Every structure is written in C-alpha cells, then in structure tokens.
Image (cartoon, grey):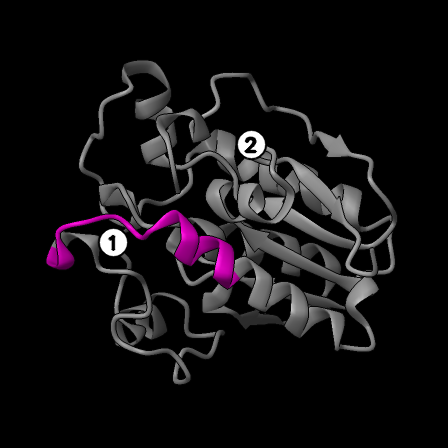
Amino acid sequence: MGSPARRDKRPAAAVRINQLARDMYLIRHGQSEFNAVFSLTRVDPGIRDPRLTEEGRRQAAAAAQFLKQHDIRRLLASPYTRTLETATIIADALGLEVTIEPMVRERAAYMCDVGASPAVLAQRFPRFRFDHLDDPWWHDHIELGQPEAEDALLVRCADFRKTMAAVADWRHVAVVTHWGFIRGMTGRPVPNGEIVHLPLDE
C-alpha cells in the first residue's frame, strides 16, 4: 500500500505499458470497489478485501489481450480478492493456471488490505490452492494497530526479486499484484490495469 497516492485518479480503460525490457511482467489489479470510491473521496470507505468493478474487469480483460501477444507461461497472483479476480480473467484468456504467492501482496494500511482466510478463499475460488498460506497471510494492521512498515515492504520486494531471479523461466512469468508492491519493486506508482516490464538481471 503506502500513501493515498496509490489510488490513481487517471482513467485506465486501456492497458498502459511501461516499456522497460521484455522481461517479467508486473500487473496491477483492475479497479476495485475501494479504488472507485477512494479515488473520488480520498477517504477509506471501509471495504474489506473488495471485488473488482465492471471497469476493473474491463481493465483485466485488456491486460489479458496484451499478454496474449507474449510468451507467458506462468501466472502468479496475490491472495487478495481483487488480484484473484484479475488473475482469473487473465488465466482464462491465456489458458494458464494461477499460483497464489503471498509475497506479492499489498502493503497493508487500509481496510481493503484486510484479507480473507485461506478457508474462505478456497470457498470463493475453488480452482486455486490456498493450503500453503498462513492465517493471516497479510500484515494484520487492524489487529497490530499499525500499517506494514515501508522497510518491511522493501525487504519483501528484495526477497521476491531474488527468488524469481533464480527461476529459469522468469522471463515468461506474469504477476498480478498491487500499487504498493509495484512501487516497491520499481520506484513508480501505477494506475489500475497497468503492466510493467521488470528486468531481474540488472
């Protein structure tokens, strides 16, 4: 997560691509119910683990059309509902399975970053596996009384980069993730639906 700036106000009906290199892709999830309200009010509407809006589903479909043109062989996704719904749309279009990866979750600071338990997620998304997740798998900032530290996010990003750089096919991986995680990996805020190319060998 991070600052309120992560809720980008720019329209995102089309896929936006940050052209860095033809490497691993990071995809910010489509617009969620939280994003739709927060972008207008800048006030947390208190929506826990929100779903995608119709606009968010259109953004996910647009991302899928872009990814169809590239040799994507694996799809990873954060365990939040908004990323799982985005990943489902992309996976259906590309004919891929989805691996749930909690390392790419959002930096928890808002109510939308309170996740669902693995048992609840398994009921909502029976096609995916969640039995490897802790409970809670997110930083429980409500219970702990403070957001996930920025340093903790950056350590998580570094760990993910190192893990993926050791995987032979990382150039063929797409990751459905969040504003805060992409910012931690690249230093840039991105709007809903944007795809970022991420080189890992620099």
- Foreground pick, 12 / 1: 1
Labels 1 and 2 touching (C-beta < 8 A): no
Counting from the top left corner in percent of width and height, residue 46 is at 18, 37
Q: Residue at x 70, y 29 (%)?
A: 16
Q: Residue at point 59% right, 35% down?
A: 59
Q: Position of residue 2 (x, y in %)?
A: 38, 38
Judged left or right of residue 71, residue 101 is left
- Looking at the rendered image, the disc whose residue lies closer to the viewer, 1 or 2, is 2
Residue underneath mark 2: 189
- Residue 131 falls in image quadrant: bottom left
Amino acid type, mark 2: Pro
Q: Residue furthest bottom?
A: 131
In the image, 194 versus 147, the foreground residue is 147
Percent coordinates x, y for residue 192 in the rendering: 54, 33
Position of the N terminus by quadrant: top left
Mark 1, residue position: 114
Based on the displayed image, in which of its 4 quarters is residue 7 positioned? top left
Mark closest to the chain's N terminus, 1 or 2:
1
Q: Is residue 22 visible in the rendered structure shown here? A: yes
